[in-house]
Image: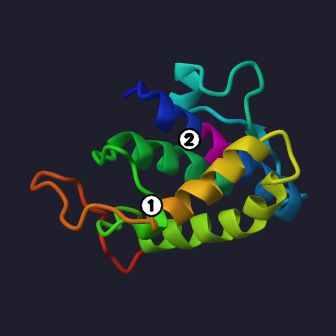
Amino acid sequence: MLIKDSKKARDTELLVRFTEWYCRSHHQNAKREPLVSTGTQAGIYGQRIPLLCADCAEYARYAEQRTELCRHDPKPFCSACPIKCYKPSMAAYSRQVMRYAGPRALFSRYWRQALSHLINGRRVGRRAPATPPADYPQAENSNND
């Protein structure tokens, strides 16, 4: 599966760049390697492939997959979506990454995307469709997370 929608591709790139910042700051002693994922194969990251530790790379691949599978059009903020397709452990990891990298994005090369995210979040009230499609894939709610 390759990400074809340009908005989803931009969202995925930004999320993985945020994860890269988080990883660099919080996992300084971990071995970081270039990310191998469908987003990398699709060319989302251009020439600069993100360097992530094993935990952050697992999260990045999971987030790419969930973004690609999202059937909402337009795709809402995951935090406001009624479906909650992320596993609880991955949702918690996502919150950590966003809380760390989100404010820093305003002072980076991604300031336009961060500002747009803030404005759009306020404008639409972070609303999402109330009911998922009948065939929408759900996260497995297991105690193994």
Say what secondary structure mark 2 lies in.
helix
15 is within the stretch colored magenta:
yes
Residue 104 in picture, x, y percent from top left: 83, 58
Q: Residue 12 has which mark?
A: 2
Image position of 64 (left or right of 66): right
Residue 59 in picture, x, y percent from top left: 57, 54
Q: Is residue 145 visible?
A: no
Residue at 19% across, 60% down: 132
Mark 1 or 2 closer to N-term?
2
Amino acid at pointer 1: Val
The main secondary structure of the magenta stretch is helix
Measured in 3D between alpha carbons, the distance from the residue under mark 1 to the one under mark 2, in whole angstroms, is 20 Å
The N terminus: image quadrant: top left
Residue 13 in picture, x, y percent from top left: 62, 37
How many numbered circles does the render carry? 2
Q: Badge 1: few (under 14), some or many (20 or more) residues near its Cα, within 10 Å?
A: few
The C terminus: image quadrant: bottom left
Residue at 33% across, 47% down: 70
> Bounds of the magenta span?
12-16
Q: Which residue is mark 1?
A: 124
